[in-house]
Image (cartoon, helix red, strand yellow):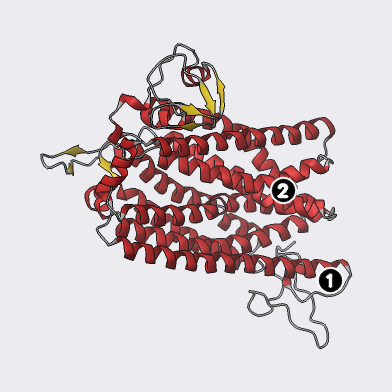
Amino acid sequence: MHTTVTLLADAPAQMLPARSLMAFTLASHIILVPMGVALPFITLVMHYRGLRRDDPTALLLARRWSAVMAVQFAIGVVTGTVLSFEFGLLWPGLMGRWGDVFGIGFGIEAWAFFLEAVLIAIYLYGWRRLKPRTHFLLGLPLPAAALLGAFGILAANSWMNTPQGFTLDSEGKPTDVNIWKAIFTPMFGPQYWHFVVAMLVTAGYVVAGVYAVGWLRGRRDRYHRLGFTVPFTIAAVATPVQFILGDAIARSVFHKQPVKFAAMEIVWNTDTHVAEYLFGRLHPDGSISGGIKIPQLDSILAGFSPDTKVTGLTSVPADQRPTATQATIAHWAFDLMVVIGSVLVLLALWYGLVWLRQRRLPESKWFYRGAACAGVASVVAVECGWIATEVGRQPWIVYQNMRVADAVTSTRSTGLWIMFGLVVVVYVFVFGSFLAVLLKMRTRWRLADEQQAAGRPGEAPETDTPYGPRSPVPAGGTPASSGDSGSAPPREGRS
């Protein structure tokens, strides 16, 4: 306990508000990331299905998802911009010394961001204004742009975990920067693919969960069935792949960042035949309370043998490793992520077995209850993965090269706390507006569907097939005009 108190006392006063502000904005932004990275792909899969099978329901879903994609992207612009400023304002030591080495990742992300914005605008504009095939082909680069943005961010983060591609001069400043080595670090591959598949899993379950809730409320039409099946199938296929990739990245951490691995598994002393703890709390004296102890399992998982030596936290001095509290946080986050992943694998297997045996969707209400919860659970797992990655690296902001305390701003802590409060207020407003817009869109779409089912001409363009002609305006009625300018006549090639 004395060591922990000493370490905290030595930290600059502004470090706590700076870390709290960065943690809050990152945790908020990462909620939007799965939809930003993976929703374009899921939308284009539905779009392709609609074109291939001449299916107006699939095209309608794709068009509506593209509208959600645009709104989500707009919110992501706000949260992402705040993060960009925070890197310079809160961590000038990091950017000032190391920006020339790993800043290329942020540059790539910025270019990808602008490219994605242009492509989303073209894709939204193309509904009813372009021929179906042309419109679909113009949308194909969207997932690639999203993956390019993820490439840039993960390149920067993986460099912070396993820095390379530079040499240090006599003053400790990086020189002779090798950009390729700085981008493709030892942790880049495991982190990138683990992240990309996680985004597919999360976005798929989030979208499918909306229609699972509709199914539980009695909406059993083809619209809800198709809206559930396509994203859930994508997520279900990706889930076991993600479980394998998760095991691979944990083993990469074991080899490349052994102290972080020790924190994630709360291993105190270096030894073989190390037990695995499911949850549990590490104390400053190395004792563990609570949790479920499984003898030898940690060594087996790390190296496929109980004789595998696992590095403990005490292998380095106390000021070069996470505190007992930080290790416990990283451990709980890691374990919760694994538990959620395991449950999602079972849900995906349930879905797959029913489909392979009976060629139909499961009928059990418990399955759809699980599917409705899977989206929220996936977002929680993503948050836990970020916590395990960042907290487990402490006290380093650049692993074994720069401490967090050396990178933090010199701004007074009072000013940072005020900034924190303002950001919280702004984010509450932004996310509240986002939710209000989504609910408004849902209500509008539901009304349009009810009018269509009743055989009445709808006021919203969504009542038409996305590539079909507009409904005629009834006498005294209101023209369909939600985002579409004018009343363009049908074009050739529209289905």
Residue drawn at 54 percent across, 62 percent down? 120
Q: Earlier in the sequence, mark 2 or mark 1?
A: 2
Amino acid under disc 2: Ala
Image quadrant where one finds the C terminus: bottom right
Q: Position of residue 492 (x, y in %)?
A: 70, 66
Residue 457 sits in quarter: bottom right
Residue 67 sits in quarter: bottom right
Question: Helix or strand or loop: what does disc 2 sit on?
Answer: helix
Residue topped by disc 1: 451
Which of these two is toward me, 374 or 413?
413
Q: Where is residue 70 in the image (x, y as percent from the top left)?
A: 57, 63
**Marks 2 and 1 close (CB-CB < 8 Å):** no
Question: Helix or strand or loop: what does disc 1 sit on?
Answer: helix
Residue drawn at 53 percent across, 51 percent down? 37
Label 2 or label 1, whichever lies nearer to me, is: 2
Residue topped by disc 2: 372
Q: Position of residue 207 (x, y in %)?
A: 67, 52
Q: Can residue 183 be seen in this view?
A: no
- The outermost residue toward the front is 2
Q: Position of residue 177 (x, y in %)?
A: 22, 42
Q: Can residue 202 be seen in this view?
A: yes
